[in-house]
Amino acid sequence: MEILDYYREIQLEAAKDAYKSTCHYLTLDDKENPHPHGSGVFIEIDSSKFLITAAHVVDDKEDEIYVGIDTHELLKMGGDLTKNIAPTQRDDDKIDISIIKLNQETLDKLGDKYEFLNQNELGINHEYKLLPMYTSVGFPASKSKYNSYKNEIKSKPFIYTTMPAEQALYDELKCESFSNIIVHYDKEKVKDYSTGQFSIGPDPFGISGSGLWFTLPQAKAKGEHIDKKLVAIMTEWPKANRKYWIGTRIDVITEVIRQKYNLTIEKSKVVRVNL
């Protein structure tokens, strides 16, 4: 097996592992039927457990966001909610983060349905590399279907390998490299690395709040844990240029958590957050 093929296998295994910490945010309509709304990532820091996503996912729905815990069962998220305030309107917000410190009742009901990402796998102070070593794992709305007869929703995750954009894009899309990450997304040319074929990808509506993961080259035996890092939360598919995604560095989120809850997590050297 060639080195690149081996790395792709490692990267795919890391994405499958990341999926275990990724949830599909759902809302209920007037008939209490679930509908896809966004994505989120469960993390754990100093034994405190959080669910992080994009702020616009929870805007005006703070008490109406659910995640699936079984084929026919949803759970409303409860806990201490923190989200940034948009400078003007949410469409202009390049931070766009939401953090729920989950309460014990929610944790008891979640049980072991999801894996909480260990703080050692948070990519604080990550130095981005202009290489296809990054993977998005989320739930596009177009890949979710509700079956009213069976009373179940089937959510298919979308795993996409990408790489950071050049610095010039940050000015064009009004982003800051110390707080944002811009990655490529050409939906007309999505490559399936298992087959080598290209296809048309989904509109990434619903992927907001999903994680961007970095997988470093490594040699692992079959079944051995793959080292990966959560480096950003994806927030925007910019109207100004649909061939890119925008995310917020995980540093912004960890700095809010570190300061608000006085937790002993690594301090960011990249971004400064003042609460």
Image (tube, grey):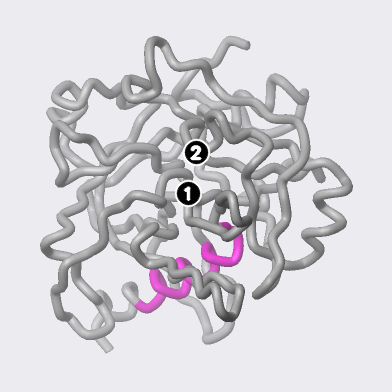
Alpha carbons under labels 1 and 2: distance apart: 6 Å
Rendering quarter of residue 149: bottom right
98 in relation to 196, above or below: above
Residue that mark 1 sits on = 38
Where in the figure is residue 164, as x and y percent of width and height? 25, 44
Crowd around label 1: few <14 · some 14–19 · many ≥20 (10 Å): many
**Residue 121 visible from this viewpoint:** no
Q: Is residue 12 magenta?
A: yes
Badge 2, how many Cα within 10 Å: few under 14, some, many 20+? Answer: many
State the quadrant of the C terminus. Answer: top right
Q: Position of residue 221 (x, y in %)?
A: 52, 83
Which badge, 1 or 2, comes first in the chain's sequence? 1
8 to 209, vertically: above or below = below
Q: On the image, numbered disc 2 is attached to which residue?
A: 57
Quadrant of the snapshot with the N terminus:
bottom left
Instruction: Name the residue at 81% across, 49% down.
Output: 106
Query: Which residues are the magenta region?
Result: 9-23
Q: Image point 46% across, 74% down: which residue? A: 13
Farthest front residue? Answer: 31
Q: Quadrant of residue 51?
A: top right
Prevalent SS, magenta region: helix
Residue at image point 64% right, 42% down: 64
Q: Residue at x 46, y 50 (%)?
A: 211
Most foreground residue, 68 or 96: 68
Q: Give the SS element for disc 2.
A: helix
Relative depth, front residue between 114 and 68: 68
Determine which of the numbered discs, if any, sits on residue 111 in the image.
none
Give the side of residue 241 with respect to residue 245, left or right. Answer: left
